Image (cartoon, rainbow, N blue to C red):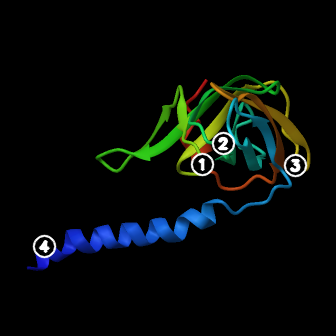
């Protein structure tokens, strides 16, 4: 009997979390948002709260933000770029079956209509690889997200103080 209750309890908890988290995902400051009309959609693709920490490794940095697809069409992030780095890539942090931290490039990323995608430590992030200039706290850097439907979305990324950054430790072997 107890074994039958566990799967049901898990489903109820997942549904409860989804109901609570959905309205919270729509919250966020519009002060750092950029957007682009997405074809025949009813709204915009917007990017909020874009930050990059002053990197511990001066050749690369991880950018974090939230994408809100306020349109009525699914879209896909197909490229990222910034003039402050030779290369920019979407990466995803994860843990393998042995409990080791792993990193993988994400060539394209689906952003369903009416949804939000969070780029954060321990998950999705944009890696700026082979930085061409120093990132200075208090300054900003440009980032361009290219979507299949919405096209280019220009983002202003705030450079924030350095801190412990698990993604950077995992990326120390990039070169």
Nearer the observer, disc 1 or disc 4?
1
Disc 4 to disc 2, C-alpha distance = 40 Å
Q: Which residue is mark 4?
A: 4
Q: Give residue 33's position: percent from left, percent from top.
A: 81, 48
Check if mark 1's residue and mark 3's residue have beta carbons within 8 Å: no
Mark 3 secondary-structure assignment: loop
Nearer the observer, disc 4 or disc 3?
4
Q: Which residue is mark 1?
A: 114
Q: Which residue is mark 2?
A: 71
Which residue occupies the foreground of this view, 64 or 10? 10
Q: Which residue is mark 3?
A: 137
Which residue occupies the foreground of this view, 167 or 24? 24
- First in sequence: mark 4 or mark 3? 4
Instruction: Check disc 3: other Cα within 10 Å, few if <14, some if 14-19, many if 20+.
Output: some
Q: Give residue 81's position: percent from left, percent from top.
A: 73, 25
Disc 1 to disc 3, C-alpha distance = 33 Å
Instruction: Check disc 4: other Cα within 10 Å, few if <14, some if 14-19, many if 20+.
Output: few
Mark 4 secondary-structure assignment: helix
Q: Residue at x 29, y 69 (%)?
A: 10
Left or right position of 101 against 125: left
């Amino acid at each position: 009997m107890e074994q039958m209750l566990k799967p049901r309890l898990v489903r109820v908890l997942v549904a409860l979390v989804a109901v609570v988290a959905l309205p919270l995902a729509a919250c966020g400051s519009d002060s750092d948002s950029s957007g682009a009309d997405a074809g025949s959609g009813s709204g915009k693709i917007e990017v909020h709260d874009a930050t990059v920490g002053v990197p511990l490794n001066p050749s690369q940095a991880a950018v974090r933000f939230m994408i809100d697809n306020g349109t009525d069409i699914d879209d896909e992030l197909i490229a990222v770029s910034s003039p402050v780095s030779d290369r920019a890539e979407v990466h995803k942090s994860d843990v393998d079956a042995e409990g080791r931290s792993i990193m993988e490039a994400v060539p394209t990323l689906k952003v369903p209509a009416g949804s939000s995608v969070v780029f954060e430590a321990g998950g999705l992030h944009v890696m700026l690889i082979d930085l061409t200039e120093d990132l200075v706290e208090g300054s900003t850097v440009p980032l361009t997200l290219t979507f299949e439907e919405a096209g280019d979305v220009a983002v202003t990324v705030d450079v924030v103080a350095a801190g412990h950054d698990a993604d950077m430790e995992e990326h120390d072997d990039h070169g």
